Image (cartoon, rainbow, N blue to C red):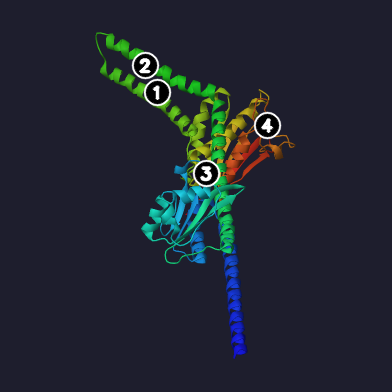
Amino acid sequence: MVNRLWLLSEAFASALDRKRMEQSLADRLRFHRLLSHLSAQLGNTRTADLDREIPNALRGIMNFADVEHATIVEFADRVADSRSWAIGDPLDRQGFPSVIDRVRAGEDVRVAGQALPDHAGVDGRTAMAFGGRSLVAVPLRAGGSICGAIVLASDFVERAWPDTFMEHLRLLGEVVANALAAAKAERESGRLRQELAHIGRVSALGELTASLAHELSQPLTAILNNAEVAQQHLEGEVIDVAKLHDIMSDIVADDNRAAGVIRRLRAMLKKGDLEHVPLHVNDVVREVTDLVKTDTRLRDTAVHLDLGAELPTVRGDRAQLQQVVLNMLLNALEAMSGGPDSRARSLAIRTSTNGKDVVVAVEDSGTGIDTAELDRLCEPLYTTKPEGLGMGLSIARTIVGSHGGELLACNNPGGGATFAFTLPVAAS
């Protein structure tokens, strides 16, 4: 009898061991499937889609952990700038300041049962408000620093959060942390590109100082002259209302001319977020050629516009595309200034489409490009100008590339060079 009981107990224990092993194996398989899925899901996510994909990842972690509440927090230098994504009740710093501060210091937090309400002030009151019985939180680490936290909570089950589970949660957290860090790096890179592009616009417009001063001085001088004539007219014994009206109309027209110059400058010098909107390339070209028309006259250069009719729209940031066209025009004018004085200086700006892309080309009658320099023209800090910084074409290539296009350069058979860039046609 004793032997039978012993054999039964051994068989029962063996069955329990097998069951535990099977469950452990199933848990490991579930974990590795989730880890693989999250790695693929978040690893291929663009920054713009992160707000949609993080909740999907959070839902997968919730299902794996079998909890009712989950939050991912992304830390920032200023606490007020931190972001969070939550399913269920939010487990962020507002409700759990003590937990979040401990995680931010690099500590894992494990609360089994209802230990939290007895010891944690605001955290405890928050947990009691939504009925949380168990809570766990781990830091999100990327590149050796803590960039956020994953916080999970269970309503109905008192969880012990074993070491194996904590290790799994930390590994899942690494995937999330890497996605957050990559998105942050991309945002920072975009901000730096904007700063560099803005510097490029300021530098390019600096080259137009003389011509812009001339363009502004003309209407301002005309306004002053007309105002003096009007003043003299008003001091006379007989006032010719019709003549006075003509003088006032001239003043208004000259004021609008000056305001237009300033408005175009402000549009190019503005500093703000990129705004990719549908636009017509021909409008961008006309705006920039208006800006440099005085400069081309001062340089005795004829400008020919050959703008394609009914071109499809593109998507882009107007100020950045203006900067690319301006840089190409200034480079062309500079190239022709070094040629023989007897050579006619002409500049042709053409726009066209091949159905897939819109093409903007600037053709000059200068001396052309040294074939040894063709491949290096768009390299950062490379310049053929003694006083140049070597950033203009490099910035232009970066801008065009960020719009999905390409910057091209070649020598013309009859002399001079052509710089062109492409922009993909906007989806209808």
Q: SS of the residue at dot 3?
A: loop
Label 3 crowd bin: few (<14), some (14–19), many (20+), radius 10 Å: some
Q: Which residue is mark 4?
A: 383
Question: Visible in this render: residue 354?
Answer: no
Label 2 crowd bin: few (<14), some (14–19), many (20+), radius 10 Å: many
Q: Nearer the viewer, residue 69 or 361?
A: 69
Q: Amino acid at mark 3?
A: Gly
Q: SS of the residue at dot 1?
A: helix
Q: Which residue is mark 1?
A: 254
At horizontal 24% and vertical 11% (from top left) the residue drawn is 238
Q: Does residue 405 lie above or below 210 as drawn?
A: below
Number of labels in the image equals 4
Label 1 crowd bin: few (<14), some (14–19), many (20+), radius 10 Å: many
Q: Amino acid at mark 1?
A: Asp
Q: CA distance from mark 1 to mark 4?
A: 39 Å
Q: Are marks 1 and 4 in contact (CB under 8 Å)?
A: no
Q: Which residue is mark 2?
A: 226
Q: Does residue 42 lie above or below 352 as drawn?
A: below
Q: Are marks 1 and 2 in contact (CB under 8 Å)?
A: yes
Q: Given this view, does label 3 or label 4 mark the residue nearer the observer?
A: 4
For marks 1 and 3 on the same chain, the one whose residue lies earlier in the sequence: 1
Q: CA distance from mark 1 to mark 3?
A: 31 Å
Q: Given this view, does label 1 or label 3 mark the residue nearer the observer?
A: 1
Tag of residue 312: none
The x and y percentages for residue 64 are 52, 66
Q: Which residue is mark 3?
A: 308
Question: Visible in this render: residue 240?
Answer: yes
Q: Does residue 8 lie above or below 67 as drawn?
A: below
Q: Nearer the viewer, residue 195 or 211?
A: 195
